[in-house]
């Protein structure tokens, strides 16, 4: 396969979503420009010869960095015709921890592979939130890049929320699992939330499995499903499809569902394990209240956790974003 354009995402869920959107957009183009995309590069191994020949004609590939690199090393993907690379959630793809000012070795290896053919390649990079450290990393690696940012985002206010998103913080004593069940029960009593779905974010895969079983036992009418990175790819995508279609009303998940996913029915995000970084909070909360709809993010905070109380002062201070507008940044 020799794609002309490559879309890279941090998760297979987001890569698959991009594939669907690109396919929809391609239907409006003249036939000679229509591109057929494999969702995930390493699925090519299981394709029939006919399917492989069709994929070899693909002009656009949507995948994750690790899958692209495996296919590149195996010779299944070549970069000789590559002209455009889009990095969605670029901070997750090319930057390290939130406050790291060094580009990780894996990101350097990725860029070397992308530019290995030597021809000019246009790079497009997007993200909803960029820390000062990550901006330093990207400016250092791409000094000629143009920066286009939301006018409300400057060095003093890097975290904003859409005006239609409400925040609710539950500081509680006692059993956290029971607090989650009470939170879901209150949401069921809310007419607006009851008409939509709910995503519960937790920190680990074992917790996701345990909480999904808990909700299935205590509130089977919610038809909960679990999603985390240790599941097989096909199971992850199937779980997300069930939730997207409303066949499951509660998705118990880890951070693999936090970035970029468009879930039109999602009206309530519960942070069972609230994140320590503002960027992670913005991404998780941003799964709801999209496209002008109203949504709620609920954080469960164990009372007496002094460190957590300090972190959440910053989250309480997040302000609604102004009306979306863009301008060119400095060269």
Image: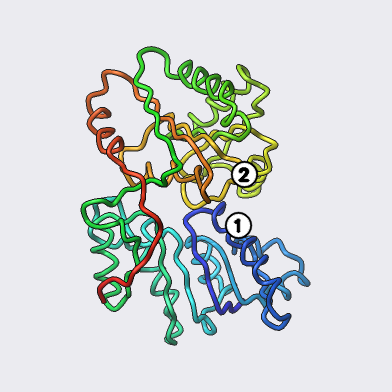
Label 2, secondary structure: give it.
helix
Position of 270 relative to 139 (above/below): above
First in sequence: mark 2 vs mark 1: 1
Determine which quarter of the picture holds residue 108.
Answer: bottom left
Q: Quadrant of the N terminus?
A: bottom right
Q: Residues within 10 Å of mark 2 (few under 14, many from 20)?
A: many
Image coordinates for residue 307, horizontal then vertical, percent: 23, 29
In the picture, the disc for residue 240 is 2
Colour logic: rainbow
Residue tagged 1: 16
Position of 103 relative to 111 (above/below): above
Q: CA distance from mark 2 to mark 1?
A: 10 Å
Point 56% across, 31% down: residue: 193
Point 60% across, 35% down: residue: 197
Judged from this view, the residue extending furthest toward the bottom is: 119
Is 328 on the left or on the right of 88, as rendered? Answer: left
Is 233 on the left or on the right of 154, as rendered? Answer: right
């Amino acid at each position: 396969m020799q794609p002309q354009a490559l879309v890279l995402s941090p998760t297979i869920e987001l890569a698959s979503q991009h594939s669907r959107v690109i396919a929809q957009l391609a239907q409006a183009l003249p036939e000679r420009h229509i591109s057929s995309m494999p969702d995930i590069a390493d699925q090519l191994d299981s394709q029939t010869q006919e399917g492989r020949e069709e994929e070899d004609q693909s002009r656009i590939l949507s995948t994750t960095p690790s899958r692209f690199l495996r296919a590149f090393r195996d010779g299944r993907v070549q970069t000789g015709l590559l002209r455009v690379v889009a990095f969605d959630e670029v901070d997750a793809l090319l930057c390290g921890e939130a406050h790291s000012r060094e580009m990780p070795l894996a990101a350097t290896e990725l860029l070397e592979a992308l530019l290995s053919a030597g021809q000019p390649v246009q790079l497009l990079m997007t993200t909803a939130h960029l820390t000062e450290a990550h901006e330093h990393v990207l400016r250092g690696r791409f000094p000629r890049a143009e920066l286009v940012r939301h006018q409300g985002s400057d060095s003093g206010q890097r975290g904003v929320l859409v005006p239609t998103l409400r925040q609710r913080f539950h500081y509680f004593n006692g059993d956290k699992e029971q607090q989650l069940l009470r939170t879901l029960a209150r949401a069921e009593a809310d007419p607006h939330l009851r008409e939509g779905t709910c995503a519960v974010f937790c920190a680990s895969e074992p917790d996701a499995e345990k909480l999904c079983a808990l909700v299935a036992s205590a509130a089977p009418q919610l038809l909960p499903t679990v999603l985390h990175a240790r599941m097989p790819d096909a199971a992850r995508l199937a779980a997300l499809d069930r939730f997207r279609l409303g066949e499951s009303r509660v998705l118990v998940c880890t951070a693999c569902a936090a970035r970029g996913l468009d879930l039109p029915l999602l009206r309530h995000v519960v942070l069972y394990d609230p994140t320590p970084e503002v960027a992670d909070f913005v991404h998780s909360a941003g799964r709801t209240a999209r496209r002008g709809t109203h949504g709620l993010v609920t954080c469960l905070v164990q009372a007496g956790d002094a460190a957590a109380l300090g972190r959440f002062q910053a989250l309480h201070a997040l302000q609604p974003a102004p009306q979306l507008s863009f301008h060119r940044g400095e060269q």
